[in-house]
Amino acid sequence: MLTIEALRRALLAGDIRPSEIAAEVARRCDAADPAIWINRMSADALIAEGRRLDGLDPATHPLLGIPFAVKDNIDVAGLPTTAGCPAFEYAPERDAEVVRRLREAGALIVGKTNLDQFATGLVGVRSPYGVPGNSFDPAFVPGGSSSGSAVAVAKGLCAFSLGTDTAGSGRVPAAFNNLVGWKPSKGLLSTTGLVPACRSLDCISVFALTAADAAAVADIVAGFDAADPFSRAMPKDVTGPSDWRGARLGVPLAANLDFFGDGDCEKLFHETVAAAERLGGEPVEIDITPFLDAARLLYEGPWVAERYISVQELIERDPEALHPVTREITLGGRDPKATDLFRAEYRLAELRRAAGDILAGLDLMLLPTAGTIYRIAEVEADPIRLNSNLGRYTNFMNLLDLAGVAVPAGFRPDGMPFGVTLAAPAFHDRRLLALAGALHEETSPLIGAARSPLAAAPPKHGSETDVLEIAVCGAHMSGLSLNGELRDLGGTLVRPARTAGNYRFYALAGPEPARPGLVRVPQGGGAVEVEIWRLPACAVGALLAAIPAPLGLGSIALADGGTVKGFLCEAAATGDARDITAFGSWRRYLDARHKGSAELAETAD
């Protein structure tokens, strides 16, 4: 996976150049789901920008060559802004302020990502540009409104991305794609150059693979902007623990929790609370009714009028230009009276006071990011109610002036990811990111759609005894889909090799990415192509943690008479697998599968 930390380390060491990163990103994007993007840089333009960045010093440009994507309601000079609506499209003259800061730091923009139209939705399916496939299973919603921004990071098309978050749009897609989603305190990131949804509540957010990566982006983008009337400077007196030991952790009462019938997510949430306790946190049950009451104000109250203001000219001139669900929601903001607004403000003031009293005795809260995840077909049948369910634990956060970080917290038995959110009063962003990083490592140390291990830093000092050579025979090989896991762990390619002639090779049944199984047999079999990689010994544990059954590490006999540790498969798992020993190479098998060759047909049952 493309983590900022790993790319930065390679750039500083001179092992890679921005133009090489650009070329690899272009290759990946060309092969990826086109619905992720609304507009993106051409391969030629991306590589040309990478070559320009080759001339800059990574020591003075902290994000040099780091690829990122931008939600298409945030301006990027040279690319149109659509906000997910072709009739709204315009050509911005300058970058949004956050984009300007990232480019100044050397970051490499890849393109503009798909979204729920006008950032209205938490599902990611309300777009005329298609639905970005959920990075784990395209039958499920990707989460919205920042759908494309989340999927682009989870799929390894960029190292981080910008989204927006008014009601949860920077957190729900993170939970549904195994990412960290940082929803900054209101005003901490400039909204200059953002198409508003609810201007008084909007936040530009950040998706990243790790909390450390999100913090690296925060170093660049956070800061006061005099051109933004909603911008706020970070106070100097923000205090609180950035370590779990002794941290008082607010956890909702059982009566407050609703997982909408999803027992798997409920189990994962309670396991995450237990993990926080293992880290030293002190769970305290709290009644979050004031928070839930505030959440209902966002769409049931007059704040919907802000959405109407944002698109008033278009919706009055051409209402059919809007997605039907977006139009229905937005038109609900046409008629509120000033008296409705003031009554809602009075009620919100009461709820803020009640929520503040609860938070005063805590260091942070831990909440589900979403109580469940839905299939696209379910959402299409009941679009507004199910979308509302997804916002149960997110809609109140900007109304109550909180900061939040969504963080991965494990997987359901069907492989779909689950996430939780850490929340605290405004401007506690830095310590929330630190706490999120520790919780991620404790609960689910896997990142992105590839479920790569959280990168273990290579040893700063040591001898050859601090490394281990490992043979790989499938998707971890150079140029294939999981090779980034080895590189992120500090791995280096030693040499190609072949096994001894007593192995059988299988294409295992299961979800993508396809995986092979190598089985040693007493007689027959053949030799199989492998690559031998050298890994820091301290990183092997992280690699092992990410290996799914029925695979494991064992000793492999090589054609040259030597042995090496490598990926092996349990023989019992090959009953429904395709025997591909005749290919002698995972690459040859993939190529034949892609071409539908006769050689492949001969291996069919």
Image (spheres, helix red, strand yellow):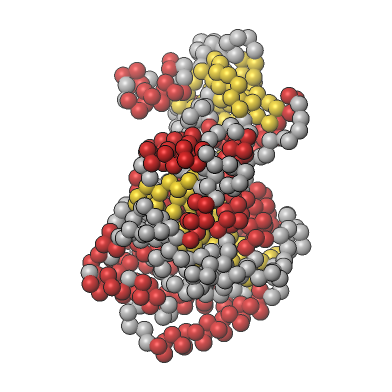
Residue 115 place in picture, x, y as percent: 38, 57
Q: Residue furthest bottom?
A: 339
Q: Residue furthest front?
A: 55
In the rendered image of this protein, does residue 552 appear above or below residue 343? above
Residue 64 place in picture, x, y as percent: 55, 44
Residue at image coords 36%, 84%: 336
Q: Is residue 138 left or right of residue 431?
A: left
Q: Is residue 236 left or right of residue 483?
A: right
Q: Quadrant of the C terminus?
A: top left
Residue at image coords 67%, 61%: 431
Residue 82 place in picture, x, y as percent: 33, 59
Judge by depth and name the residue closer to the eye, 449 or 67: 67
Picture quadrant where residue 341 is located: bottom left
Residue 196 place in picture, x, y as percent: 41, 68
Judge by depth and name the residue closer to the eye, 50 or 6: 50
Q: Is residue 132 visible?
A: no
In the rendered image of this protein, does residue 278 appear above or below residue 323? above
Q: Is residue 94 visible?
A: yes
Picture quadrant where residue 563 is located: top right
Residue at image coords 61%, 27%: 492
Residue at image coords 64%, 19%: 564
Task: Count every numbered label the image shows and give the total.
Answer: 0
Q: Is residue 165 left or right of residue 30?
A: right
Q: Is residue 234 left or right of residue 510?
A: right
